[in-house]
Image (tube, coloured by chain):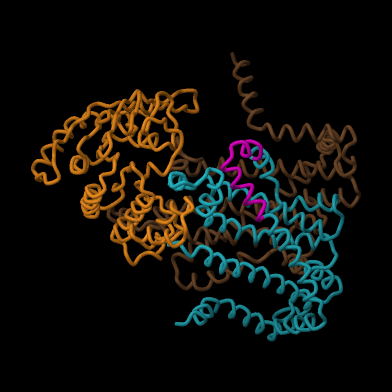
């Protein structure tokens, strides 16, 4: 019985991902039969073998952890600072007047261009990497937090006051929960950014991390290793995104979007 | 021969967990030329779905709908439609919207403009030709939608709870104006609404549908002329509401059971 | 208050920060090698512009960014609308999108170095592919979310089925599509700079790198300022175009 259900589940999975499977099959077929230059596009099986080797000897896990560590640390710092300043902006007009133009300018500029300055100041190690990640991630978090806390439906606040909540407790009891979806959306935008920037900074400094792994592979012209790195990065990105989605569902269990029939 | 012939029409939807939902079950209805017919029923009874099938937007799962003897396969300018939330093209001005169907037919610029203008005047929106819908009130937007539909000179007007999104006062005015327009042009109108009194005020025949799966519970002739008194309309509306009441209660209970 | 005055007042804190920078430098609070004063940076900026370095490299960078971004925008919008309106297209493309979506866009750069070497095409390709995915996804979601009754209205007013995506769905989805394009625009600059840092060969990223290596830190800061200003200007220009195109909104 369980076997039949598993088979049905497998069939559904295949149907939904048909085009991906076709691409993978074509990849292996065209490279094995020599249609594509094996250097530029190593066969899928070679890539998997190389990935397997580098996982077994600990190289890929080491780089994944290095990247994840910096990304999470930078993101964490950005989250704390971002939420604090965003909330502050909605409560204090002075804070808003000072921070708003900074955020407005910071949003569209390629913040990665500051990397050489950070390297000048902090050297090539983790400090400049984490600083860059935090710098990049803080912007969408501040913005989303400010929008969420400033636009709390005034009827929520009036109802709470009406039901006896003291004004100074309103912030933690009403504003933060009401703004939570918006804040978490901001965090959700920033999270993948952390990984993107982590990978780039590692590529620039050649340091430990998935970026460094791939850049070294290119420099030494080991194409299977480049693809193995891509695969590892893809999977790390997947874990990040899925992990965050699960967290979001947990935190927002009360929200309409997680209700049956909702979009989550 | 009736203008619109709904022959044993059913609509079923497949749900993702292998179950099936029957929205409409074997509905049979005939509507003659020049009639104003309303369809009322509780939420979810499928009255809008039925209208959409007559319009050709949604295919029937079983049965057929014939208009002038021919089966309905696709939407067309002979069956104009107006929706509850207006569905105006927000990137076009009032004039652009009203002209739209004429442009699709390939009518020349000058003639288009003249025709569109006459309909804009008819729905009392003169002066707003170059305004975008986002700047208009709900009532005004619905007038644009009506003008846009009429400009193509359809023989059948399908109206899907057209005044549902308007406030009560605007709604009353729109009902009166719609009745005036109908008395002028005598088109065939199929009007879906929640509002029993509105149905009685506007139409000669009212179709009452049951809760899901939607079937025709009864068809009532209002027997009221254009100058019917308020008391007469209210009495008829009460009578119809009594017929509708259990269906509404049933549908609310079913909604709760689904959660 | 006139618009120009309003804008100046809004950005006052930025001017204040810049003034603070200069004052701190003058007061000797900043190490001049690590943190040149604002006036030093501006002098370097003028110097680099006079010698043509800034303009030449900026031109090259802009050419790459515009090519990559425009290509991604056109193809991305086409693909997104096609996916929303055609079940077959969606069934083919959606799994591919879902599979490649978690990849951090910057990770593609080494791949393009491998395939295309260190010239312009590697950078344009990285920008193109990096921006393509977000644009397809936002366009697809926007097109999917278009009110069906708009489509039905157009249909009943005589619009042929093949014309509906371009006459109705795209205009209706445009506000959301433009918002997605704006985000992708910022991403394109990030990818441009990243690629130019990695693959030296003209461009502002390359210039920043060489100035740093030569020890001309004031010049390096100036070049960073330049690319920052360009990115900012591009965003504001986009906003202007956006408001023009979407003038019909509330």
The residue nearer to you, when weighing C34 against C70, is C70
Would residue C84 be counted in the magenta stretch? Answer: yes
- Whether residue B106 sits left or right of residue A197 in the image: it is left
**Where residue B9 sits in the image (x, y, percent)?**
37, 26
Magenta residues, as a range? Answer: C73-93
Task: Tell me the quadrant of the picture where the N terminus of chain A can be found.
Answer: top right
**Where residue A203 sits in the image (x, y, percent)?**
80, 55
**Where residue A134 sits in the image (x, y, percent)?**
65, 59
Q: Quadrant of residue C47?
A: bottom right
Figure disc tally: 0
Instruction: Identify the residue at horizontal 59%, vertical 80% (top origin).
Output: C15
Q: Which chain is in cyan here?
A: C
Q: Is residue B205 visible?
A: yes
- Whether residue B124 sits left or right of residue B238 in the image: it is right
Judged from this view, the residue extending furthest toward the top is: A1
**Where residue B193 sits in the image (x, y, percent)?**
27, 40
Q: Colour of chain A?
A: brown
Q: Colour of chain B?
A: orange
Question: C248 above or below B249?
Answer: below
- Whether residue C38 sits left or right of residue A190 in the image: it is right
């Amino acid at each position: 019985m369980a076997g039949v259900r598993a088979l049905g589940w497998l069939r559904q999975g295949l149907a939904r991902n048909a085009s991906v499977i076709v691409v993978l099959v074509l990849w292996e077929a065209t490279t094995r039969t020599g249609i594509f230059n094996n250097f530029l596009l190593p066969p899928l099986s070679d890539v998997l073998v190389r990935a397997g080797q580098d996982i077994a000897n600990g190289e890929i896990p080491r780089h994944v952890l290095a990247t994840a560590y910096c990304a999470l640390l930078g993101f964490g710092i950005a989250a704390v600072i971002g939420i604090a300043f965003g909330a502050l902006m909605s409560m204090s007009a002075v804070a808003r007047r000072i921070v708003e133009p900074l955020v407005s300018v910071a949003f569209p500029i390629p913040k990665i261009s500051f990397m050489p300055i950070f390297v000048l100041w902090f050297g090539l190690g983790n400090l400049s990497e984490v600083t860059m990640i935090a710098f990049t991630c803080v912007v969408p978090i501040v913005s989303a937090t400010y929008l969420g806390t400033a636009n709390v439906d005034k009827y929520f606040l009036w109802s709470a006051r009406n039901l006896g909540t003291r004004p100074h407790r309103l912030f933690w009891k009403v504003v933060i929960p009401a703004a939570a979806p918006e804040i978490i959306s901001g965090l959700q935008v920033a999270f993948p950014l952390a990984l993107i920037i982590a990978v780039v900074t590692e590529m620039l400094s050649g340091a430990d991390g998935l970026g460094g792994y791939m850049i070294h592979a290119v420099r030494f012209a080991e194409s299977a290793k480049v693809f193995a790195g891509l695969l590892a990065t893809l999977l790390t990105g997947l874990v990040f995104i899925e992990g965050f989605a699960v967290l979001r569902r947990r935190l927002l269990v009360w929200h309409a979007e997680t209700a049956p029939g909702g979009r989550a | 021969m009736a203008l619109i012939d709904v022959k044993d029409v059913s609509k079923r939807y497949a749900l993702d967990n292998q179950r099936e939902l029957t929205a409409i079950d074997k509905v049979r209805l005939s509507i003659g030329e020049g009639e104003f017919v309303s369809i009322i029923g509780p939420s979810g009874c499928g009255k809008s779905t039925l209208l959409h099938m007559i319009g050709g937007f949604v295919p029937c799962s079983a049965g057929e709908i014939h208009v002038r003897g021919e089966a309905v396969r696709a939407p067309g300018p002979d069956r104009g439609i107006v929706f509850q939330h207006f569905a105006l093209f927000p990137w076009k001005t009032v004039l652009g919207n009203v002209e739209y169907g004429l442009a699709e037919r390939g009518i020349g610029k000058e003639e288009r403009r003249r025709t569109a203008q006459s309909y804009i005047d008819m729905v009392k929106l003169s002066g707003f030709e170059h305004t975008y819908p986002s700047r208009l009130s709900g009532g005004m937007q619905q007038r644009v939608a009506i003008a846009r539909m009429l400009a193509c000179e359809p023989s059948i007007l399908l109206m899907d709870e057209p005044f549902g999104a308007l406030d009560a006062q605007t709604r009353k005015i729109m009902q009166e104006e719609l009745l005036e327009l109908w008395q002028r042009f005598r088109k065939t109108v199929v009007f879906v609404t929640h509002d029993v009194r509105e149905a009685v005020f506007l139409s000669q025949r009212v179709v009452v549908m049951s809760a899901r799966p939607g079937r025709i519970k009864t068809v009532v002739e209002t027997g009221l002329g254009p100058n019917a008194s308020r008391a007469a309309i209210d009495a008829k509306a009460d009578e119809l509401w009594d017929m509708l009441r259990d269906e509404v209660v049933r549908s609310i209970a079913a909604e709760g059971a689904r959660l | 208050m006139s618009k120009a005055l309003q804008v100046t007042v809004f950005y006052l804190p930025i001017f204040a920060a810049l003034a603070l920078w200069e004052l701190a430098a003058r007061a000797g609070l900043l190490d001049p090698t690590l943190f040149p004063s604002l006036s030093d940076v501006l002098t370097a900026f003028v110097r680099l512009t006079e010698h043509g370095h800034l303009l030449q490299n900026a031109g090259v960078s802009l050419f790459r960014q515009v090519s990559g971004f425009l290509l991604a925008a056109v193809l991305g919008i086409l693909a997104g609308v096609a996916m929303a309106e055609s079940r077959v297209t969606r069934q083919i493309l959606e799994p591919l999108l879902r599979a490649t979506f978690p990849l951090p866009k910057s990770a593609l750069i080494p791949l393009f170095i491998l395939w295309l070497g260190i010239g312009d095409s590697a950078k344009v390709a990285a920008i193109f592919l990096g921006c393509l995915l977000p644009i397809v996804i936002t366009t697809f979601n926007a097109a999917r979310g278009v009110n069906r009754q708009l489509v039905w209205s157009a249909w009943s007013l005589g619009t042929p089925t093949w014309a509906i995506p371009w006459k109705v769905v795209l205009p209706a989805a445009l506000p959301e599509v433009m918002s997605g394009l704006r985000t992708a625009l910022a991403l394109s600059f990030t990818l441009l700079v990243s690629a130019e840092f990695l693959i030296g060969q003209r461009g502002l990223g390359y210039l920043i790198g060489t100035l740093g290596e030569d020890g001309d830190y004031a010049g390096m800061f100036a070049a960073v300022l330049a690319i920052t200003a360009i990115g900012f200007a591009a965003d504001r220009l986009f906003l202007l175009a956006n408001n023009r195109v979407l003038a019909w909104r509330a």
